[in-house]
Image (tube, grey):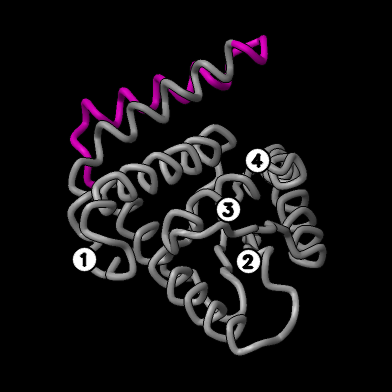
Amino acid sequence: MVGVHVKCTVPEIEELTDEERKMNKVIIDAEKRLKTDLRDFIRDLKSLDQESKESIKQAVRKCRQAKRTVDRDCYIDELQSIIEERIPKVLGYRDELQTITKERIPEVLKQVVRHLAKLLAHFMIIGIKFDIDGMRVHDSIMIPCRCKTTDGLLDLDKLVASGELDELFSLVMSCLINQQVTARVSLSEKEFKNCLASLNADAG
């Protein structure tokens, strides 16, 4: 198990002011909403019918087998679309988005679902699963991840280093508070080394 840590900030606010304190509370509230949304999103995926699950598995397989980057990107988009289409009820449970005007809610929700679908697509491809019951929000978001192989763990490390997760979490959080947010995603070096050592030991 290794934790993915997500730290969110609002770039425009640099000094500790009343406005920053207010915005920090907004960010924390949005992080809590993200935790709920992500948990419900994953549970919805688990409850899909067998045909939908098979469609997702096939799309994941195509992504893993793609030889060229352009092909892989196309398959990721395909996988993202399949996930979006299979999660219609996700759009119905975000009644807590009171800070966004009613006119904006439908489009905002669609964007959140789109970004979460792409986020989960990346993790499906490298074979990493979220421990949704272990997610915590304090001064950042901590998402425990189950890694079954060293390749999966190393791929997770590469994904974090690529900056793609920074971009996706930034987009999701920006949608939730209707303001630009910068997210920085990292892995604990200690947790990474411990997880890698455990996986190598299990592999013999």
Q: Secondary structure at mark 1?
A: loop
Q: Earlier in the sequence, mark 4 or mark 2?
A: 2
Residue 56 image position (x, y, % from top left): 36, 28
Q: Which residues are magenta?
A: 47-70
Label 2 Cα crowd, 10 Å radius (few <14 / some 14-19 / many 20+): some
According to the image, label 4 marks what residue? Answer: 164
According to the image, label 1 marks what residue? Answer: 95
C-alpha gap between disc 4 and disc 2? 19 Å
Q: Earlier in the sequence, mark 4 or mark 3?
A: 4
Residue at x 43%, y 46% (from the top left corner): 116
According to the image, label 3 marks what residue? Answer: 170
Q: Nearer the viewer, residue 138 or 46?
A: 138
Q: Secondary structure at mark 2?
A: loop
Residue at x 55%, y 37% (from the top left corner): 122
Q: Earlier in the sequence, mark 2 or mark 3?
A: 2
Q: Is residue 157 magenta?
A: no
According to the image, label 2 marks what residue? Answer: 10
Residue 102 image position (x, y, % from top left): 21, 58
Amino acid at dot 3: Ser
Q: Earlier in the sequence, mark 1 or mark 3?
A: 1
Q: Secondary structure at mark 3?
A: helix
Marks 2 and 3: CB-CB under 8 Å?
no
Residue 184 placement: quadrant: bottom right
Q: Name the front one of labels 2 and 3.
A: 2
Amino acid at dot 2: Val
Amino acid at dot 4: Glu
Q: Is residue 54 magenta?
A: yes
Label 3 Cα crowd, 10 Å radius (few <14 / some 14-19 / many 20+): many
